[in-house]
Amino acid sequence: MRVIIGADLVPSTQNYDLFEKGNAEDLVGEALASILRKADIRVFNLETVVGSKGRMIKKSGPYLRCPEQCIRGIKAFNPTVLSIANNHVMDYGKDGLLETIRIIEANDIEWVGAGENSDSLKKSLIIKKNGLKVGIYSCAEHEFSIAGPHYAGCNPYDPLYSFDDVHELSQKCDYLIVLYHGNKEYYRYPSPEVQRVCRKFAECGANMVLCQHSHCIGAAEEYRQCELVYGQGNFLFYG
């Protein structure tokens, strides 16, 4: 089983035209496109709203959104799963989130990490491939995008629930990947708190824990036979 986990994927004004053409080689080159094609499972963090619906929420920091036609380039990478538990998925409110999910589903791509409220969150999924079950659990630190009982958003990291969720999922799959959207931007080392969180996920049954969001390559360690990576950098993201 060959699994490739791409970091932050965001179409930007500099490459909208290439995404709209839908050619993977134009976007990342033949060598990387060939590596992606050879994988059994491809996972990316889609850190943007897709489409034109919704209005800007009140927040600090940049707002990320791309035209619906950019899904052609995203689909060209043949993603098995798009994780949308991140700090930008709610930049344009509930309507922006639901439009993004609609476009992803219309292109026959699996997704994980968000929902209309905290009771309907799609926190995880299991991919069955080559006789194996690969579990993916996706969550994000608390910023402007997390879901609540009465509002949409992404799956929040919550010490009262997240560790139990991972333990339960570990009993149902052969290999479990946790995608944790958090840590300090542009800093390659984990905070003591993030390290404790990632190690706890390992104790609860994760085989790999990947921290995304830092936008730089991070440190890594092995803990209880679990690979912990504290930052992947970006897969394709101008900014």
Image (cartoon, helix red, strand yellow):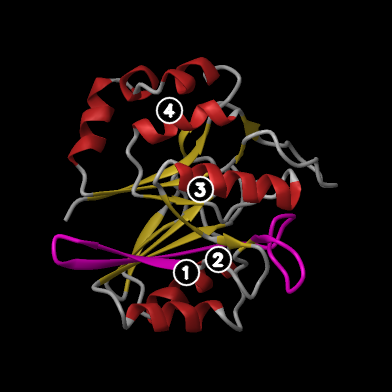
Q: CA distance from mark 1 to mark 3?
A: 15 Å
212 relative to 126, above or below: above
Q: Are marks 2 and 1 in contact (CB under 8 Å)?
A: yes
Residue 147 location, quadrant: bottom right
What is the CA distance from the residue labelled 3 to the residue labelled 4?
A: 29 Å
Task: Specify the farthest residue to the right.
Answer: 58
**Which amino acid, mark 1?**
Cys
Residue 36: quarter of image? top left
Q: Which of the two labelled residues, at mark 1 and mark 4, occupies the earlier sequence position?
A: 4
Residue at x 25%, y 21% (from the top left corner): 30
> Marks 2 and 3, Cα distance to the nearest angstrom?
12 Å
Q: What's the magenta region?
A: 124-153
What residue type is disc 2 on?
A: Val
Closer to viewer: mark 2 or mark 4:
4
Q: Residues within 10 Å of mark 2 (few under 14, many from 20)?
A: some
Q: Quadrant of the N terminus?
A: bottom left
Q: Secondary structure at mark 1?
A: helix
- 130 relative to 120, above or below: above
Q: Position of residue 13 (x, y in %)?
A: 61, 20
Residue with the mark numbered 1: 198
Q: Is residue 233 left or right of residue 186?
A: left
Secondary structure beneath label 4: helix
Residue hosting label 4: 73
Q: Position of residue 235 (x, y in %)?
A: 43, 36
Q: Name the image quarter holding the C terminus.
A: top right
Secondary structure at badge 3 equals loop
Q: Earlier in the sequence, mark 2 or mark 4?
A: 4
Disc 3 residue type (three-letter): Arg
Q: Which residue is mark 2?
A: 194
Residue 222 lies left or right of residue 233; in this view the side is left
Tag nearer the camera, 3 or 4: 4
